[in-house]
Image (cartoon, rainbow, N blue to C red):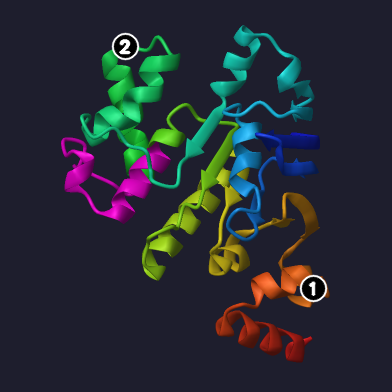
Amino acid sequence: MIELKDINKSFEGNLITKGVSATFEKGKVTQIIGKSGSGKSVLIKCVIGLYAPDSGSILYDGQDYLELDNAARTEIRKKIGMLFQASALFDSMTVLENVMFPLTMFTDRSKSEMMDRANECLQKVKIIDKGHLYPAETSGGMQKRIAIARAIALEPEYLFADEPNSGLDPQTAIVIDNLLQEITQEYNTTTVVVTHDMNSVMEVADKIIFIHEGAKWWEGDRQSLIQTNNKELQEFVYASKFMKRLRETLIKGI
């Protein structure tokens, strides 16, 4: 479990993240939604240690990450899997080498053991016999799956994904959603997803957090999202005609 307590982060005097407190539970998918520029990605980068918050606490299973020394922080980082928006694969490495990368960084396994683990992860995301290819030789959807395979190579306890469905067609986006959900259940990970994809939210989110102008504006599950009277959240969620029709249909069925 991860607990955030009153996280504030500013850049050049501009407060981006405003006193955010939240809990991310083990074995569940928490999705963070909000407009572009609302502070979602900044918040996640604080949680995983890419940014240092100005104030607040970040507890990983009771340990305050901000109070730990470098060695203890490294131990927590080993337990984190991260899927970046643009996949962030290394162009000069093959698919297999990309998935092996965290194993070479954080373990002392033999090369054959690392290759076995990397192939196991690729099979998990349904990529077989493609390890010799380079990222540029694969599709955007396959690159996302490769990035997921790399993120789970160390069997993470905490899994983060920043806009995992960005740039994907609807069918491929469903594949990615299903993979993240399966991995969360299989590894019992604490999974946090930043997304604009409301289809994804309605399919896989166990908990939803809405960030508005840097602050946590709303928190709840999918059913309460449909029924919310929160003005700013309604404006965000029902910006699309599809979501408006979905809400009307579900409310009629209650």
Instruction: Give the residue drawn at x 35%, y 24%.
Output: 101
- 150 vs 196, left or right, is left
Q: On the rendered image, what quadrant is the N terminus found in? A: top right
Tally of marks: 2
* Vertical order, 192 against 241 (above or below): above
**Sequence-wise first label, 2 or 1:** 2
Q: Position of residue 111 (x, y in %)?
A: 27, 15
Q: Amino acid at mark 1?
A: Lys
Quarter assignment of residue 69: top right
- 118 vs 77, left or right, is left
Instruction: Give the residue drawn at x 56%, y 83%.
Output: 242
* Vertical order, 100 against 245 (above or below): above
- 9 vs 129, left or right, is right
Q: Nearer the viewer, residue 251 or 55?
A: 55
Q: Which mark is residue 170?
A: none
Instruction: Give the residue drawn at x 56%, y 22%.
Output: 77
Q: Which residues are magenta?
A: 126-149
Residue, disc 1? 231
Residue, disc 2? 110
Element class at badge 1:
helix
Q: On the rendered image, what quadrant is the C terminus found in? A: bottom right
Question: Residue 157: in sight, yes or no?
Answer: yes
Question: Which label sits in the foreground, 2 or 1?
Answer: 1
Q: Amino acid at mark 2?
A: Ser
Q: Does the magenta-highlighted stretch encompass residue 134?
A: yes
Q: Position of residue 59 (x, y in %)?
A: 76, 28
* Vertical order, 155 against 210 (above or below): above
Instruction: Give the residue drawn at x 48%, y 57%.
Output: 178
